[in-house]
Image (tube, grey):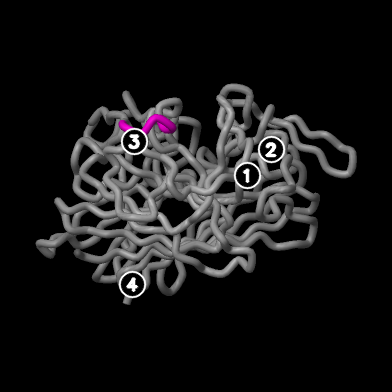
Amino acid sequence: MVRFSVLEPWQDPRGGEVERVRIDNGTIAIEVLSLGGIIRSLWVPNAKGERVNIVLGCDSVADYLEQPAYLGAIAGRYANRIANGKISHDGVEYQLSVNQASNCLHGGVEGFHRKQWQLGTTNDGVRLTLLSPDGDMGFPGNCKVQLDYRLVGSNLYVEMLATTDKACPISLTQHSYFNLDAGSSNTSHDIQVDAKHYLAMNEVGIPTAMLPSAASDLDLANTTSMSVQTERPALAATNGFDHCYVMDNADGELQRFGKLSSKQSGISMTVYTNQPGVQLYGANFLQGTVGKKQQVYANHQAVCIEPQMLPDSPNQPNLPGDAWLMAGGVYHHISRYEFSIE
């Protein structure tokens, strides 16, 4: 049985209020904000049987609006990078918001992470909805989004549906920063990845080739310490892991990506998704972000595991996955985060 607690809303300096709700199934619990679909806290049991929060977050709307890290939010309309902020369909070119080097990143300067979503409850979680109007950050079509967070045993399910009335690329991801042991660095964490390919990138993060990960610096087939992020030469340009792994998932089935774990807390998180790609990001540029209790976060203090469509795939149809959602079609993303003790 899931218990719901409505928490005191926060004032939005832009006007209005941000709703907050806590959902608890007795095993795990989350706090969700109507701002950005943000997961502010996620409590899971550690090896001592104590429930601990394992995601980074902030203490006010102002702090969330100030930070550039997308802490805990839904990134959209299109997660990751679109080259030169340009897309085209049937001969019509669209100029998107450019907010990272020459790219449109995570939907632009006022992406879904800064929007006010409508928040309601379901039997086992919460449902958030959003209407993104035609032309929002340059994207074509009126886009309707439904986001469900569901707690089932020791699992958090994230499920997203979207429709649009014009052809538009859609890719949504949950951008939580996981720190499984409340430490100041993710070097105490281990990572293991099933995916056998990754995307090589140019200097601004746009894919240039799909390569096998075996025997490369991106090979995480065996459990590997996150400390290699500052040791392997191929990771130097991005200051650590900030790479998209390609799933062998042509049928869009829920498939295991890999596992993040911490020996200090005993907590493991195994991630499953139906998406064609998963961005692994080592919080390489988190330095200076203000979090809870005014803690100033450091680089490499957490790990993001972001299931998504492939970066720039609206412009690179040779890449796996169909990034373009046609009018009348339905975008469907489902990911499962399974927590266990080792």
Question: Disc 4 on helix, strand or loop?
Answer: loop
Which amino acid type corresponds to the residue marked 3 in the rendered image?
Gln
Tell me if mark 4 has few (under 14), some (14-19) or many (20+) residues whose alpha carbon lies within 10 angstroms of its own: some
Q: Amino acid at mark 2?
A: Asp
Chain part drawn in magenta: 231-235
Label 1: state its secondary structure. loop
- The quadrant in which the C terminus is found is bottom left
Q: CA distance from mark 1 to mark 2?
A: 9 Å
- Residue 106 lies in the magenta-colored region: no
Q: Which residue is mark 1?
A: 77
User: CA separation, marks 3 and 4?
Assistant: 38 Å
Q: Quadrant of residue 259?
A: bottom left
Using the numbered discs, state the Cα–Cα distance from disc 3 to disc 1 in whole angstroms.
29 Å
Q: Which residue is mark 4?
A: 2
Q: Residue at x 13, y 60 (%)?
A: 50
**Residue 269 percent across, percent down from the top left:** 32, 59
Disc 1 vs disc 2: Cβ atoms closer than 8 Å? yes
